[in-house]
């Protein structure tokens, strides 16, 4: 059984004019696999993630089938809600957006830990501290008492990742997790994601506009354009020569240093 | 005569609460020649944006001198400086934020003409703005729209058109592409390259991505915690960096080749020392996260000294690796 | 096109907004009625009809909306009251728009010492007891609508100045303001062309709230005997009178109160419409 199985997924937004954001997408993810969906803004890649977890805007409608560990999520709000967080974790582009500004980092983590694992206060607190160590936040125990605004952008994204991982999801959705960050911090966050997937046996669905982000991280790459997936191939094949002209354009756009031969 | 000259420029902010000062920009010298495109690289919080804003007199200098074609401009009063705004323009990072949401694109682009040339008739302002919009590739029917109706790339083109509308000699480009999709980044960088070659514009190009800077600029400055740590031609900087921080910036540039995976895995294998946020008072600003740190690095601040290939570098140990620092795992990146 | 785009587009947008246009039409009718209406009624506002005291609407000849205890025609009194209340409300709102917006926008834009000085002045005025101030004014200038107007105007702009200053402080940090500075715009130009247009949303919402608020303040002052006095009518003192006769002559309350409700509704709908029309992001 596949971990996540998306079949003929279509997402429509009503309005004038109506918009078809996702147009018949098929995609499967195995356990422990890392997949990247690459495309420009407006290609529908974020809406695809939202549709999978029942987080579409009010005027959005998803058709097709999304199965997580065999259970259908589309049209079943309760199952989608149960899977969110515990089965599928979320990391967003704007880390400060997923942290409540007026609560301490430790309290936010402990609340989820307590809810997900039925832990006592003390155990939840210890688990929170462990998660912060897991994402390599220096002085983890001190950070628990801090508020999000006291952390740098990179540290906030680490906390956001810890927050997504507390409930031990089998699959992590990462929507442009490094776009708002400096290249140096980006490299660290990517390394962290790769390490966590390896150590926790977690699958990863990464959505980005930047092929530079996925090159090192993804086993498989799906290129999305105008709501459709135009190419899916293994990372090795992709970087040795993308089949679709659009993919080649994306690849050429990545700013790189001229590397010595 | 150089176009722009900075001497020991510092910008300090008073820290809220306990008093004391934070030097966002700490004693920076450089000169910029006519038609020159100079790159400034560093991570967020290093003071690169503040430096750009100081040159445009959006923040006051705490110390140092700013000279524009030999003339002191940091001491001019705002009224006397205003005519010079024709010559110094800028492009900001976030195109969504740098255009007034209540003005049409054409109005925004024409606005500097209204402020800087009061005698220009409306019809000429409109035609001038229209010309610049054509130059950056904005279709005429988009000119009467509002910012929220345009994409990020189109907005950034409009911002560039606004900077060009007064025919400046120098433009500060503060992270002009980092808020955009990579495909759009590519188009905007190409546009900037074209404009530069057509107009012979001088520019300070600020970015956190060394690859973007190296594509556009002959000369690159690397900034860390308010100071320049290395400066030189793009060739030597990107192939044989002398400062460990430059090395780190190079390593961070993502690669899209088969070796990228291996490099990332090596990065996991040898994690960096944990970085604390405490600011050291003495010694090298980079010492707290430098893999090559020695005891005296924490005590004595390294001066910016001449090094190989007409470079300047602020590192006590730079002479120990004349061939440049190598990437993680010893391989060239 | 370059200078009047925002307002031209806003007007076009407003014409498509049915609720706002209805409100505008009703409001215009009310204004016309308040100014020209009394000419078409056979009674003067202080004329006593001894034959018809406290009659209900539509029961006595010529008194369409009935009369009060003293036999004065309620329709003409309400129209007069509407005229006074509208004039005071509009004048006070205008004062609050002009002084309050300019004061707040400049303070917020300049920040620092100028801001502190300007806002402390507002605080000092805030701290003055308004009723006390009005009493002093009546002693100096005598009672009357003008005194009332000065009294309400002097305080009406304070809250507006505070709201606007808060918004201006935030707007000032936006990049498009810096872009305007780099583009050579001066302080006044930036405040007028970038700060003020961008804070119109909250300003208009607050201005529409000011209208009923001022009418209520006026009625309160009239009730204390320092506002509009009998036999002059204002919506405020008509409602106060009506409330006293609520059980025996409910129409005396219903007519002026209905008029006030209608007025407030219209201002709110028009305010909402204007706010949307002035924000390009809300256009389709």
Image (cartoon, coloured by chain):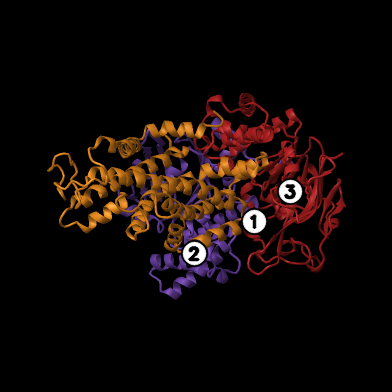
Chain colours: A purple, B red, C orange
x then y, percent, for residue C251: 19, 50
Q: SS class of the residue under badge 3?
A: loop
| Residue to which mark 1 is pinned | B267
Q: In this view, does B38 lie to the left or right of B146?
A: right
Q: Report how far apart the C-alphas of labels 2 and 1 lie in the structure.
A: 63 Å
Whether marks 2 and 1 lie on the same chain: no
Picture quadrant where residue B315 is located: bottom right
Picture quadrant where residue A191 is located: bottom right
x then y, percent, for residue A250: 58, 36
| Residue to which mark 2 is pinned | C127
Name the front one of labels 2 and 1.
2
Residue extending furthest toward the left = C59
Q: Using the image as rendered, state which of residue C129 and residue C137 is in the foreground.
A: C137
Picture quadrant where residue B92 is located: top right
Q: In this view, does B146 lie to the left or right of A187?
A: left
Residue at point 45%, 73% (across, down): A123
How crowded is the residue under tag 1: few (<14 C-alpha within 10 Å), some, or many (20+)? many
Circle 3 marks a residue in which chain?
B
Q: Residue B332 carries which label?
A: 3
Q: Report how far apart the C-alphas of labels 3 and 2 lie in the structure.
A: 71 Å
């Amino acid at each position: 059984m596949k971990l996540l199985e998306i079949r003929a997924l279509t997402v429509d937004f009503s309005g004038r004019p109506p918009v078809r954001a996702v147009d018949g997408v098929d995609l499967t993810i195995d356990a422990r696999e890392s997949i990247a969906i690459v495309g420009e803004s407006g290609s529908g890649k974020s809406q695809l993630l939202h549709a999978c977890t029942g987080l579409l805007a009010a005027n959005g409608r998803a058709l097709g089938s999304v199965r997580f560990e065999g259970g259908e999520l589309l049209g079943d709000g309760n199952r989608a809600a149960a899977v969110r967080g515990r089965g599928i974790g979320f990391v967003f582009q704007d880390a400060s957006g997923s942290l409540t500004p007026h609560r301490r980092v430790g309290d936010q983590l402990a609340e989820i830990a307590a809810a997900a694992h039925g832990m006592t206060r003390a155990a939840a607190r210890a688990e929170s501290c462990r998660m912060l160590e897991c994402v390599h936040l220096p002085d983890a125990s001190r950070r628990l008492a801090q508020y999000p605004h006291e952390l740098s952008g990179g540290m906030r994204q680490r906390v956001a990742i810890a927050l997504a991982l507390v409930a031990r999801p089998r699959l992590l959705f990462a929507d442009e997790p490094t776009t708002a960050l400096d290249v140096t911090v980006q490299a660290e966050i990517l390394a962290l994601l790769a390490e966590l997937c390896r150590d926790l046996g977690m699958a990863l669905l990464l959505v980005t506009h930047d092929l530079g982000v996925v090159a090192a991280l993804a086993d498989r790459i799906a290129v999305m354009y105008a709501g459709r997936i135009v190419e899916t191939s293994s990372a090795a094949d992709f970087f040795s020569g993308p089949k679709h002209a659009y993919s080649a354009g994306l690849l050429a756009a990545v700013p790189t240093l001229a590397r010595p031969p | 005569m150089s176009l722009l000259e900075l001497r020991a420029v510092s910008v300090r902010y008073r820290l809220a609460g306990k008093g004391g000062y934070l030097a966002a920009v700490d004693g920076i010298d450089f000169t910029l020649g006519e038609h020159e495109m100079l790159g400034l690289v560093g991570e967020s919080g290093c003071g690169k944006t503040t430096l750009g804003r100081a040159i445009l007199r959006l923040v006051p200098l705490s110390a140092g001198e700013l000279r524009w074609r030999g003339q002191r401009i940091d001491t001019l009063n705002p009224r006397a400086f205003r005519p010079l705004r024709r010559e110094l323009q800028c492009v900001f990072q976030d195109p969504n934020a740098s255009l007034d949401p209540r003005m049409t694109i054409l109005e925004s682009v024409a606005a500097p003409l209204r402020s800087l040339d009061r005698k220009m008739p409306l019809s000429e302002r409109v035609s001038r703005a229209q010309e610049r919009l054509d130059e950056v590739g904005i279709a005429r029917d988009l000119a009467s729209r509002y910012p929220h109706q345009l994409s990020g790339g189109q907005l950034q083109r409009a911002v560039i058109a606004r900077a060009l509308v007064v025919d400046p000699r120098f433009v500060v480009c503060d992270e002009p592409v980092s808020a955009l999709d990579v495909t759009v980044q590519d188009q905007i960088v190409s546009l900037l390259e074209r404009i530069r070659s057509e107009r012979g514009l001088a520019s300070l190009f600020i970015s956190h991505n060394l690859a973007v800077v190296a594509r556009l600029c002959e000369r690159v400055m690397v900034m860390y915690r308010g100071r320049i740590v290395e400066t030189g031609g793009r060739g030597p900087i990107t192939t044989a960096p002398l400062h460990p921080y430059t090395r780190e910036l190079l390593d961070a540039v993502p690669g899209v080749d088969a070796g990228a995976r291996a490099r990332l895995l090596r990065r996991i294998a040898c994690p960096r020392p944990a970085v604390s946020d405490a600011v050291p008072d003495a010694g090298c600003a980079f010492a707290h996260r430098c893999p090559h740190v020695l005891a005296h690095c924490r005590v004595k601040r390294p001066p910016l000294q001449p090094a190989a290939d007409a470079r300047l570098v602020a590192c006590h140990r730079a002479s120990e690796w004349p061939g440049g620092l190598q990437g993680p795992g010893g391989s060239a990146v | 096109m370059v200078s009047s785009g925002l307002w031209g587009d806003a007007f076009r947008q407003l014409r498509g907004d049915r609720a706002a246009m209805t409100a505008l039409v009703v409001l215009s009718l009310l204004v016309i009625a308040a100014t020209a209406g009394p000419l078409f009624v056979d009674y003067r506002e202080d004329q006593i009809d001894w034959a018809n005291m406290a009659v209900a609407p539509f029961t006595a000849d010529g008194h369409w909306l009935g009369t009060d205890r003293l036999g004065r025609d309620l329709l003409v009194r309400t129209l007069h009251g509407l005229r006074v209340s509208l004039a005071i409300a509009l004048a006070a709102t205008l004062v609050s728009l002009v002084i309050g917006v300019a004061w707040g926008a400049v303070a917020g834009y300049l920040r620092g010492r100028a801001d502190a000085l300007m806002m402390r002045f507002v605080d000092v005025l805030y701290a003055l007891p308004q009723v006390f101030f009005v009493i002093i004014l009546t002693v100096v200038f005598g009672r009357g609508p003008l005194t009332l107007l000065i009294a309400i105007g002097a305080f009406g702009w304070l809250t507006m100045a505070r709201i606007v200053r808060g918004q201006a402080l935030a707007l000032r940090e936006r990049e498009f303001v810096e872009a305007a500075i780099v583009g050579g715009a001066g302080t006044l130009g930036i405040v007028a062309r970038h700060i003020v247009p961008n804070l119109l949303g909250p300003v208009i919402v607050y201005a529409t709230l000011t209208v009923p608020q001022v009418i209520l303040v006026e009625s309160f002052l009239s009730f204390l005997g320092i506002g509009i006095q009998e036999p002059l009518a204002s919506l405020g003192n008509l409602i106060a009178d009506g409330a006293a006769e609520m059980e025996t002559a409910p129409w005396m309350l219903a007519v002026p109160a209905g008029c006030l409700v209608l007025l407030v509704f219209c201002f709110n709908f028009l305010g909402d419409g204007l706010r949307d029309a002035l924000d390009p992001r809300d256009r389709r």
